Image (spheres, helix red, strand yellow):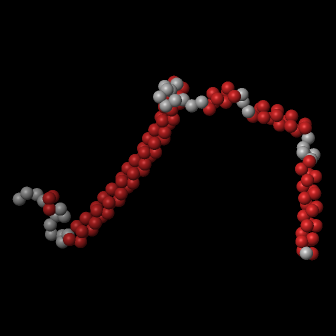
Amino acid sequence: MAGTHTVLLTLLPTVLILIVLAGVESAAVKDVKDSKAQGASKRVFVPASDASNVLKRRGRRSPRTYEEYYAEQRVKMAANEQRREHLEEQSNEYENYLEEERDEQYERTREKNEQWREFHYDGQYPRYPHHRRYE
């Protein structure tokens, strides 16, 4: 029984405070701030007619304006130009790589052939058989 009295005594002040505060609307908020908020909302929000024009979407089958078409073409052309420059750069890099690889391969082959000829040359015949005179 004592526990019930303790719970009721702690809940009673809480309920009384809530009842009193429910009657008070708002003591901390001033009316001047409301007029400032309305001024700010007028700057942020546009009239309904302007808003409907902004949000109005063109129908699927309705023709596009010249400005829309021209803007779309400019975006496409810019993307194509970037793509072309990128591909050209890639092909130039690949060509340079191939040229270097071919030069290195040619040099290795030439050195290898030269070493083979030096190793197999016995001094009796001319170095290259196709340079012999016809007899």
Q: Position of residue 15 (x, y in %)?
A: 90, 58
- 78, above or below 96, in the image: above
Of 25 and 55, nearer the camera is: 25
Q: Quadrant of the N terminus?
A: bottom right
Question: Which of these two is toward me, 36 or 18?
Answer: 18
In the image, is 134 to the left or to the right of 79? Answer: left
Q: Please give left or right for residue 45 compared with residue 14 in the image.
A: left
Question: Which residue is located at x 90 percent, y 45 percent?
Answer: 25
Q: Would you identify the image quadrant in which residue 31 lies?
A: top right
Residue 28 in view, yes or no: no
* Placement of 51 over or under 97, stated as above or below: above
Q: Residue 50: horizontal and vertical position, in percent?
A: 67, 27
Q: Is residue 58 visible?
A: yes
Residue 52 in picture, x, y percent from top left: 64, 29
Residue at (33%, 56%) from the top-left corner? 102
The quadrant holding residue 46 is top right
